[in-house]
Amino acid sequence: MAKPLVVSIPHNLGKVEATRRLHGGLSSLKSQFGDKIASIEETWTGDTMAFRVGAMGQTIAGHLDVLDDHVRVEVQLPWLMSMIAEKAKGFIQKQGTLMLEKK
């Protein structure tokens, strides 16, 4: 199994506000990138969200933990997609920051 991709997204919102802004955030990705994303599942347990995204015939699974000053995202990429890990990291960083900036 490939090493997980870990992304840290800093914020200064506090844990409660960051969690509020991220709730339902993956749904907005579906509306933005619907032609590339087949399915999205997100399940929250406290300040942790487990997710599964079906994209390009592959399933991407992971979780994120909301902390006081950053969000830690850990993604297990399928072998085929692990070759584009750096691009995926940039995408996760950008989309996560956009979700946190929205009020």
Image (cartoon, helix red, strand yellow):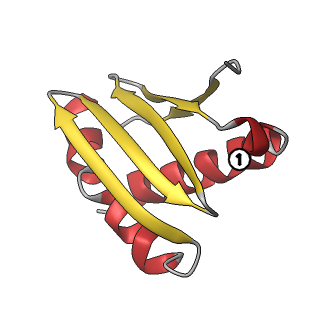
Of all residues, the one furthest to the right in this rendering is: 83
Residue that protrudes farthest toward the front in the picture: 57
Q: Quadrant of the C terminus?
A: bottom left
Amino acid type of the residue tagged 1 in the rendering: Ala
User: Dot 1 surroundings within 10 Å: few (below 14), some, or many (20 or more)?
Assistant: some
Kindly identify the residue that appears in the image at 70 percent across and 41 percent down: 89
In this rendering, would 100 be left or right of 7? Answer: left
Residue 33 locus on image (x, y percent): 54, 75
Q: Is residue 14 visible?
A: no
Residue 54 percent across, percent down from the top left? 49, 57
Residue 95, given in percent of the width and then of the height, sits at 54, 56
Nearer-the-camera pick, 41 or 28:
41
Nearer to us in this view, 77 or 103 = 77
Tell me where residue 31 appears, x and y as whole percent. 41, 79
Q: Secondary structure at mark 1?
A: helix
Which residue lies at the image location 32% right of the left edge and 22% below the top edge? 68
* Up-down relation of residue 7 to residue 30 (above or below): above
The answer to whether 101 appears left or right of 58 in the picture is left
Q: Quadrant of residue 1?
A: top right
Residue 56 can be seen, yes or no: yes
Residue at the (32%, 35%) spot, across then down:
50
Residue named by callout 1: 88
Q: How many marks?
A: 1
Residue in the image at 55% along x and 32% along y = 75
Q: Nearer the viewer, residue 99 or 30?
A: 30
Tell me if 2 is positioned left or right of 58 in this view: right
